[in-house]
Image (tube, grey):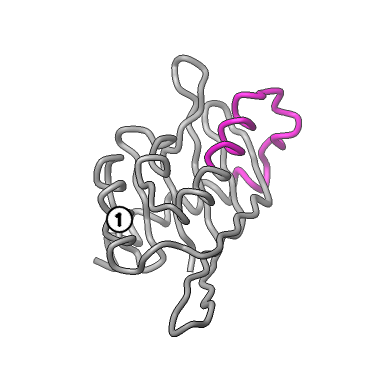
Amino acid sequence: MRQNFLQSIVPIAVSALLVLATGVSAEHSGDPKLHHAIEKANSEWAAAMKTGDAAVIVAPYTDNAVFIGFDGTCTQGRTEIEKMYRARFDRAGLANSTKIDSKRLVVDGDLAYESGYAEIGSLKDGKLSTNGGRFLTVWQRQTDGDWKILRNVVLP
């Protein structure tokens, strides 16, 4: 499993780092659809983690999207990613707090690379326990000009 993770993440990470180092800043991309898609997805993720609405969380994903968890687990396809979130809610419950901080966005043609920090707070034994980490989200421009999530990677 670890090797599958490395085979999946290394090309994405290397590509993203190259783009982040040399790409065009999103502020200069001139694509308001991209900015709207990211703001909408991030704010809806934060709210849906508190309500358990997995369908809202996966709405911005492409049908063939891949979600890579911090442990290297790869979940392929929007339907499977939705099942993964539902299982997470069944196992860990709803989030009591959420935070998402999109720090950098770089556009390279029909792909955009968003990186930042996110965290989820949950009550455990009456105390708020917060888990957070870095993320890399690869957005893909669709034929209609809208942007959808192609890859979402939770970085260790």
Q: Does the magenta stretch include residue 116?
A: no
User: What residue is disc 1 on?
Assistant: 74
Q: Which of 62 and 7 is in front in this view?
A: 62
Percent of width and height locating residue 111: 52, 33
Percent of width and height locating residue 36: 62, 30
Percent of width and height locating residue 78: 30, 40
138 sits to left or right of 62: right
* Three-letter amino acid code at the position of disc 1: Cys
Q: Nearer the viewer, residue 136 or 82?
A: 82
Q: Which residue is drawn at the image coordinates 33% and 60% (left, top)?
A: 89
Q: In which quarter of the image is residue 108?
A: top right
Q: Compared with residue 15, is residue 132 higher up or lower down, i.e. above or below?
A: below
Q: Compared with residue 71, is residue 99 higher up or lower down, i.e. above or below?
A: above
Query: Which region of the structure is painted magenta?
Result: 19-41
137 sits to left or right of 104: left
Q: How many labels does the image show?
A: 1
**Which residue is farthest front?**
126
